[in-house]
Amino acid sequence: MTPTDLRLEPGTFTALIGPSGCGKSTLLNAVAGFVQLSNGALTVDGRHVDRPHPSVGVIFQNFALFPWFTARGNVEFALKRFVRSKPERRERAMAALKEVGLEQHAEKYPGQLSGGMKQRVAIARTLSADPDVLLMDEPFGALDAQTRLRMHELLTDLWMQRRKTVLFVTHDVDEALRLADVVYVMSASPGRIIRKVDVDLDRPRSVERLDPRFLELRGELLGLLRHDELTQEE
């Protein structure tokens, strides 16, 4: 079996793309410590990964919010692992919600929030613990196109301010190019990394004006995915 070799440089934004079922989410879950490796090794800042760790935060597509807690309550609950003081938990929760633009909605319950707002709460919840590594598993896949673009802008702003190391799983080539410094392409099952593509585009990246280099990179990534799909069919 061809090994999967992936290296994330500190402070970089890396996207992982590939067809459904190729193992993108499994690889991310392994980095998070949710899945044990059958062979090989995985380290984060020199630490062997064999279980979840506070230095690694995870954001999922389905928000995973408790419906009986307010937005603030959801963030505070996640902080109980790290912060004993209730006033400090509240302060950090409110700071995180302010950072994602939800300070005025802190006392609303998930059922009172839009999809984009729920995902903002999920981002605030993870960022409040100040992890070194941020793992995101198709976090915007359930959002409409307009909301997704707004979330791209928010995430880019947060990343540029905090410079966390991000691994972002997506099947959307355009999304990967709008967000990432580096894109790794995975093949169909059995999944393996077949190409690393550096995204040499200036930030911020406007969706309204796609420059020729964006289109060139898009064509390269789509070509890799298409070629692998045809190879699997042969």
Image (spheres, rainbow, N blue to C red):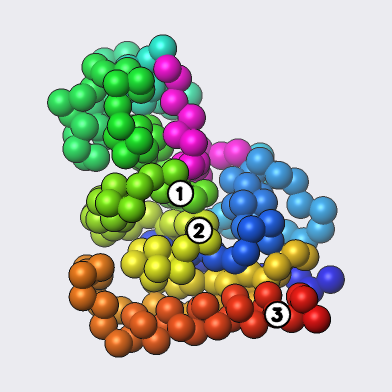
Q: Which residue is labeled 2 in the image? A: 170
Q: Which residue is drawn at 67% across and 51% down?
A: 26
Q: Residue at x 34, y 67 (%)?
A: 178
Quadrant of image for the C terminus: bottom right
Q: What residue type is labelled 3?
A: Leu
Quadrant of image for the N terminus: bottom right
Give the mark nearer the N terminus: 3 vs 1. Answer: 1
Q: Residues within 10 Å of mark 1 (few under 14, many from 20)?
A: some
Instruction: Tell me if label 2 and label 1 are in contact, CB under 8 Å.
Output: yes
Distance, label 2 to label 3, CA atoms, is 21 Å
Vertical relation: 230 (above or below) 69:
below
Vertical relation: 167 (above or below) 224:
above
In the image, 130: left or right of 147? right
**Magenta segment:** 52-67
Q: Which amino acid does label 1 sit on?
A: Gly
Give the mark nearer the N terminus: 2 vs 1. Answer: 1
Query: How far from the left and from the top, in percent, is residue 225?
Result: 59, 75
Q: Quadrant of residue 85?
A: top left
Q: Nearer the viewer, residue 1 or 80?
A: 1
Q: Which mark is residue 141?
A: 1
Give the mark nearer the N terminus: 2 vs 3. Answer: 2
Of badges 3 and 1, the one in the foreground is 3
